[in-house]
């Protein structure tokens, strides 16, 4: 028995549906970053099971009102454990939240209605 076909996405034709992460321009990558800001919230992993828990603790540079980094160009200097997301690593970082724009795009899924575009 075959699965029913997927319904058409209302987002067909948008750059994140027509390009891979590797094919995006810098402007498109940064636009996708706006949909990925949830990664600025800290996550925690248990030692015994490696289960990931998402928290309500944010990075000290997160401007929660604007959903942006307060010092994006210098974030790695000010927050040494800040992870620079790349097309290569977003596919392997299992702690990215399910709503992360990069993760959604990498998985071929639609962005949520509330995510900036």
Image: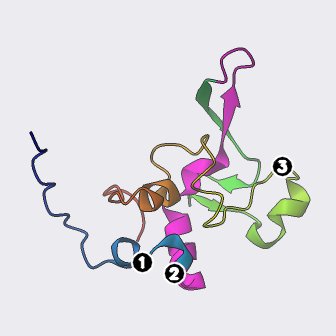
**Which residue is depicted at the point 11% across and 44% down?**
2
Q: Which residue is mark 3?
A: 81
> Considering the numbered disc 2 on the image, is that residue within a helix, a strand or a loop?
helix
Q: Quick check: 31 left or right of 41?
A: left
Which residue is disc 2 drawn over? 23
- Quadrant for residue 17, please give it: bottom left
Are dots 1 and 2 in contact, CB under 8 Å? yes
Residue 24 belongs to the span the image colors magenta: yes
Specify the label residue 19 is tagged with.
Answer: 1
Instruction: Report the span colored magenta.
Output: 23-50
Residue 29 image position (x, y, % from top left): 55, 75
47 on left or right of 63: right
Contact, mark 3 vs mark 1 (Cβ under 8 Å): no
Residue found 73% across the figure and 46% down from its top: 59
Mark 1 crowd level (few <14, some 14–19, many ≥20, 10 Å Cα) = some
SS for callout 3: loop
């Amino acid at each position: 028995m075959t699965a029913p076909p997927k319904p058409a996405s209302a987002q067909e034709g948008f750059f994140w549906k027509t390009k891979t992460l590797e094919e995006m321009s810098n402007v498109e990558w940064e636009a996708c970053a706006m949909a990925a800001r949830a990664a600025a919230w800290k996550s925690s992993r248990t030692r015994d099971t490696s289960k990931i828990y998402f928290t309500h603790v944010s990075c000290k540079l997160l401007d929660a009102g604007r959903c942006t980094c307060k010092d994006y160009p210098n974030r790695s200097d000010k927050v040494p454990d800040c992870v620079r997301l790349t097309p290569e690593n977003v596919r392997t970082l299992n702690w990215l939240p399910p709503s992360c724009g990069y993760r959604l795009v990498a998985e071929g899924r639609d962005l949520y209605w509330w995510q900036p575009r």
